[in-house]
């Protein structure tokens, strides 16, 4: 249960470098492959190797810029390479989001690790940004980090659906490798709309007074019991309220470092719906995100 092939987009910024350490920790100690993808920006810029001061480069030519980025990649390979891990580099021109997605497909990546603001420099998530485009269309889970702080507490959000459960395995893999504790959270919305609640209501004869909280706890216990051992510490929580807002409030109050969720856990749609739970959490979360797109056959 490891991510054998990891894609790491880096563009020379301090922010993008925040993704390097978790990517290295998640890479297997034996037989792993880490691909560093860089898409040059042809302008005056500062290239910062992780752990070093930034070096200013005044734009002279595309060739000079490519040489600077190639040197940046090589320095990372030299400084961070280790036995048992193959580090490959790709230096490509084009649209960053498209190249990240295409490279992940070509490399058969099991995980993409990237910084949320490495390309845009924005303070908040923005619909249409590079990171969000990658999250929408990536062929594998995406770990988007926001800072260099270690990931110690992972919040795994569920709603009882098979689609939402697709985030369980990747989340537990990440938590195990990063030695993070996990909280499995189900938020009970005011309206009974999710797959599991409807099934529970039907089993109870459709009573409007039926309270599924005990069933949710049993469901979470079942999921926890299915996890392979040894595994991370896993706590279980059931909360009530508006789903996205409750997830965000919980993450902030409990010092969550990473929220893990499937992109279509509630809508079952093939495309994101702006305003959906996932999109709202993506826009407003103050911590990193692990986003998983379920297999296509589950989205029909």
Image (tube, rainbow, N blue to C red):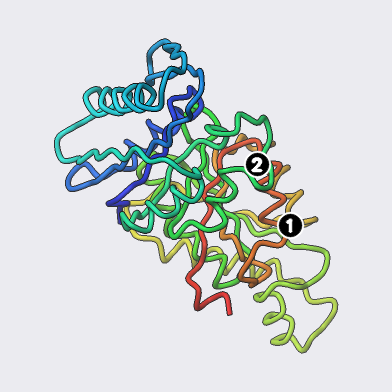
In the displayed orientation, state which residue is furthest to the left: 83
Disc 2 from disc 1: Cα separation: 21 Å
| Residue 195 on image: x %, y % | 66, 76
Q: Mark 1 points at which residue?
A: 274
Q: Earlier in the sequence, mark 2 or mark 1?
A: 2
Q: Which of the 4 quarters of the picture holds residue 17?
A: top left
Q: In this view, does 17 lie above or below 208?
A: above
| Residue 127 on image: x %, y % | 68, 47
In the displayed orientation, state which residue is furthest to the bottom: 205
> What residue sits 68% from the left and 42% below the top?
126
Give the camera-side residue of 93 and 291: 93
Q: In this view, does 33 lie above or below 44?
A: below
Give the camera-side residue of 24 and 66: 66
Question: How would you rate the neighbour count of disc 2 (Cα within 10 Å): few for under 14, some for 14-19, many for 20 or more?
Answer: many
Give the camera-side residue of 202 and 97: 97
Q: Disc count in the image?
A: 2
| Residue 160 on image: x %, y % | 61, 69
Quadrant where the C terminus sits is bottom right
Left or right, 58 with respect to 271, comes to: left
Give the camera-side residue of 257 and 141: 141
> What residue sits 68% from the left and 69% below the top?
267
Q: Mark 2 points at which residue?
A: 251
């Amino acid at each position: 249960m490891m991510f054998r092939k990891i894609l790491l987009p880096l563009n020379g910024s301090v922010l993008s470098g925040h993704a390097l350490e978790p990517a290295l920790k998640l890479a297997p100690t034996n037989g792993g492959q880490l691909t560093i993808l860089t898409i040059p920006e042809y302008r005056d810029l500062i290239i910062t190797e992780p752990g070093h001061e930034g070096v200013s480069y005044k734009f002279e030519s595309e060739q000079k810029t490519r040489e600077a980025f190639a040197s940046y990649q090589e320095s990372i390979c030299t400084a961070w390479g280790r036995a048992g891990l193959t580090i490959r580099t790709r230096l490509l021109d084009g649209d960053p989001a498209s190249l990240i997605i295409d490279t992940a497909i070509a490399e058969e990546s099991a995980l993409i690790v990237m910084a949320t603001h490495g390309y845009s420099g924005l303070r908040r998530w923005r619909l249409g940004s590079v990171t969000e485009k990658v999250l929408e269309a990536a062929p594998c889970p995406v770990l988007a980090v926001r800072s260099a702080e270690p990931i110690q507490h992972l919040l795994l959000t569920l709603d009882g659906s098979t689609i939402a459960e697709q985030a369980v395995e990747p989340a537990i893999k990440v938590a195990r490798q990063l030695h993070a504790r996990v909280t499995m959270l189900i938020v009970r919305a005011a309206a009974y709309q999710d797959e599991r609640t409807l099934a529970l209501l039907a089993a109870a004869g459709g009573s409007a007074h039926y309270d599924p909280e005990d069933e949710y706890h049993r469901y979470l216990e079942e999921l926890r019991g299915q996890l392979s051992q040894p595994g991370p510490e896993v706590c279980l929580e059931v909360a009530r309220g508006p789903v996205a807002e409750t997830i965000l409030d919980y993450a902030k109050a409990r010092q969550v470092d990473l929220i893990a969720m499937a992109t279509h856990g509630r809508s079952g749609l093939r495309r994101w719906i702006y305003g959906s739970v996932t999109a709202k959490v993506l826009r407003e979360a103050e911590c990193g995100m692990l986003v998983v797109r379920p297999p296509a056959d589950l989205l029909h």
